[in-house]
Image (spheres, rainbow, N blue to C red):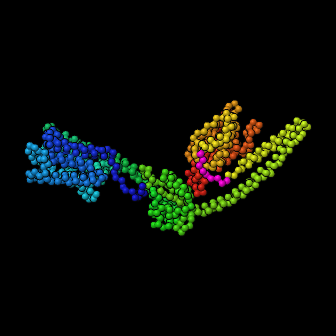
Amino acid sequence: MKPASNRKKKSVKVPKWVKPLSLVIAILIFLRGLMIMMGWILNVEGSLVLSHFDGPMKFNTALIFSLSGIFMMLYKSTEKFWRGTAVFIALIIIVISISSGYNSLFDRNVLNLLVLFDHTNAITLSNSGMSFPMACCTLLLGIGLLMMPRPNFRVKLTGMIILRTLFLTANVAILTFILLIPLHEKSAFPFINGIPLESSILFWLITIFVVLNDEKAVIRKILFGKYSGSRYVRRILPVLVIVPLILGLTVITGLQRELIDLNLAITGFTVVSIPLITMYVLYHGIKIDKVDINSKKLQENLEQLNTELTQYKIGLDRVAAISKTDRQGVITYVNEQFCELSQFSRQELVGNTYALVRSGHHKPIFYQNLWTTILGGEVWYGHIKNKTKAGDYFWVESLIIPFADVDGNIYEYLSLQNEITERKEQELRVKSEYVRSLEFKNKELEELTYIASHDLQEPLINLISLTTELVETMEGNLDEEVKKTIGYIQDTSARMSQQIKGILDYNIQFQNIEIQEVNCTKLVEEILHDFSKQIANQKASIVYENLPVINGYELPLRMLFINLISNALKFHSKDRDPKIRIKASIEGLNWIFSVQDNGIGIADHNREKVFKIFQRLQKTSEYQGAGIGLAHCKKIVDLHSGHIWVESEKGKGSTFFFSIPTFIKNLKTEDFYNPKYGS
């Protein structure tokens, strides 16, 4: 959609019933003309007359009305053939009208089409032709219809004027009949005498059809417009027509029956009609005044808001680079700040796209996310690296706002940008220092790991070995107290060795791993296969459902599920078989996984404690372990920028939840920055 400034003015919307009503009018006119023609051909007199007040319609007149009905059904067609056919029909109407007028004036029988069907020689000009006034009206009709499909405005306007003249003539003829004016009283209007009532009604319907279907017709705009004048006309027009009509009919009836004299009739008509119409007009005038008062207040508020917006714009122009684009991303406006920042002139930028300043730094997924956001009608915020005309790079903090019309269709985007090149360079320096510090810490950690795995483990292994040898050598000479002490030394050494091994496991560095698609169903199936013997021994029931394919680090996710399933099997209740349920669902921008068991449960005050390293809640004699597993789980979930938590009830079981962002693949790219997902 084009920007608001370039959009064409919308035509007046007409009610939905107008189109079917127009079609009904066209069909009725066609059928009535056809019925009268058949009546003449088959000599069926009953079909020729609408009422006893009117004479029969002539054959040529009926033919013209039937052709007019066909024209009305064709002239709005978008196909060239049918529009050409409509023009040809209008030309036929003109030819028939001219010949009928000629016949009426000079008593001739040119183009008397009914003669073709006459087998008795009874048909004459008087019963098949038309009067000169009718010929003039049908000629006006043909000329008006011929001009209506023309693209030229002046020609079309002339056609509308001709049809309006015909409309007024038909109105006068209809009103003289409604008001019961005798024919001798109409002698001052000899032209009207020659136009029958039925023909007047059909002329009136044709002109009404044209008005309803002409988008530029003033009457259509007034009748169906949305402005105050149109609403006012729709309210008072029925009264202005109906009241004088009813009063006039009443007065004429009274005069004909000699119930009142002429003076009383004129006085009564004036005294009744003027106050009634005046009061009605004043009533609606007061209502429109109220509307105008409210409109004026709204206009004043709007002017005040416009003043404030102008001030805001001046302020924004001073501190931000502002640009506007259409829906396709073509730049339609830039301010001075934008020109100074990009070093392009306004003429170079307007009509172009942002590709002109694109640096090539960002990956295609970055711009895909941007367009997905703004095409969805949401505001986008992020950091973009652009390039000046001279080739220098600069960073901007950008806010892109989509604008939609009343139908919800986006037609324009407003971009507010603030240069942050210096800030980004400082962030880069801080990041580099942080990376160097992190590398140094990792090196220290590797050295500590080496010490733990070699220097600390070796004495413990020797101690366990020596005490074992001592027991075997001095087996018969050791009392119970000494045996108990040696056993304590061995258990303590074994526990310490296990804790050191736990430290090594916890400090595993996941190096050279990449985000990839992980089929969680397949992953869990492989883990359960490895645990199959333990599951069978414990008679455990494990159910998994709705496990998705996600983006993540495959090996850490495998270790995460291993730890959670292993814990669920280990910490089961002694009085019931283990039941484990693994589920996943998407909530917002995260996959939420859950591992539920019916084990021993966790007390409320220990829920956070379980994720800390070496935090054991059970005795070693009851449940083996070093207190590392859940701490390791938290580390893996943190690696995926997710969260892990537990819901539990002591003695009834626990449910461990963890979240994995759906956008993790984008989150791990260096140029991803969008508050919708997180930064």
Q: Given the current orientation, which residue lies at the most extreme bottom position?
A: 390
Does residue 171 appear in this view? no
Q: Is residue 640 above or below residue 338?
A: above
Does residue 290 appear in this view? yes
Q: Which residues are magenta?
A: 511-519
Name the image quarter holding the N terminus.
bottom left
Q: Residue at x 50, y 52 (%)?
A: 372
Quick check: 619 left or right of 124?
Answer: right
Which of 387 and 267 lies nearest the eye of the viewer? 387
Q: Position of residue 585 (x, y in %)?
A: 57, 42
Q: Position of residue 575 (x, y in %)?
A: 69, 30
Q: Is residue 482 above or below residue 302?
A: above
Q: Residue at x 71, y 55 (%)?
A: 442
Q: Position of residue 63 (x, y in %)?
A: 18, 47
Q: Residue at x 83, y 44 (%)?
A: 464
Quick check: 240 left or right of 573?
Answer: left
Q: Given the current orientation, which residue lies at the most extreme right position?
A: 477
